[in-house]
Amino acid sequence: MPAFFMMEFEIGYLGLLITSFLAATFLPITSEVFLVSMLVLGYDPWITLFYATLGNASGGWFNFVIGRLGNPDWLKRLKVPKDKIVRWKDKVQRYGHWLGLLSWLPFIGDIMAVALGFFRAPWFSSFSFILIGKFLRYLVIVSLFILGWL
């Protein structure tokens, strides 16, 4: 087993929390693998659900705050096409904080959380929907494991 995986299990729930946080950022990390691995090793399913959700939601909230701190000039410097900016602004204005429910999706979920912050979606409802979306995703994974389908 690679050393990185061993480190994950040596630091247990804290490792899952950190991995889940990092997975919610733009880093190419998948927290589901670590979550299921910990379940296979006998870690408590409900505690793993708690730490995975807390870590991943915190990462989503971090992305939201980064977006909120964002400056439109940065988008120009990064050469983000104006049509993409307009599309995301339209999505945030149309769907608002509901986009937070989809923030668990790979890569695009990170962009959704940043866009919610950047285009000034209400923070409390955005944070709440990010938390709910992340929780439901991990609840499905833990439930499938408990049922023996994973």
Image (spheres, helix red, strand yellow):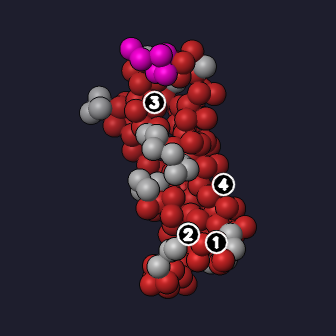
The location of residue 135, given as percent across then percent down, is: 52, 49
Q: Are marks 3 and 1 in contact (CB under 8 Å)?
A: no
What amino acid is found at the position of numbered circle 4 in the picture?
A: Phe
Please say whether residue 128 is one of the residues in the magenta stretch.
no
Q: Which mark is residue 34?
A: 3
Whether residue 126 is visible to the viewer of this picture, yes or no, is no
Q: CA separation, marks 4 and 3?
A: 21 Å
Residue at which label 1 appears: 74
What amino acid is found at the position of numbered circle 2 in the picture?
A: Leu
Please, which residue is most extreme toward the left here? 149
The location of residue 73, given as percent across then percent down, is: 66, 77
* SS for dot 3: helix
Sequence order check: which comes first, mark 1 or mark 4? 4
Please say whether residue 2 is one of the residues in the magenta stretch.
yes
Indicate which label's residue lies in the foreground, 3 or 2: 2
Q: Quadrant of the N terminus?
A: top left
Picture quadrant where residue 34 is located: top left
Q: Which residues are magenta?
A: 1-6
What residue is rendered at 58% in x and 77% in y?
A: 76
Q: Which mark is residue 62?
A: 4
Query: Who is closer to the viewer here, 12 or 6?
Result: 6
Residue at which label 2 appears: 78
What amino acid is found at the position of numbered circle 1 in the picture?
A: Trp
Picture quadrant where residue 105 is located: bottom left
What amino acid is found at the position of numbered circle 3 in the picture?
A: Phe
Sequence order check: which comes first, mark 3 or mark 2? 3
Would residue 41 appear left or right of 54 to someone viewing this image? left
Q: CA separation, marks 4 and 2?
A: 20 Å
What residue is rendered at 46% in x and 51% in y?
A: 136
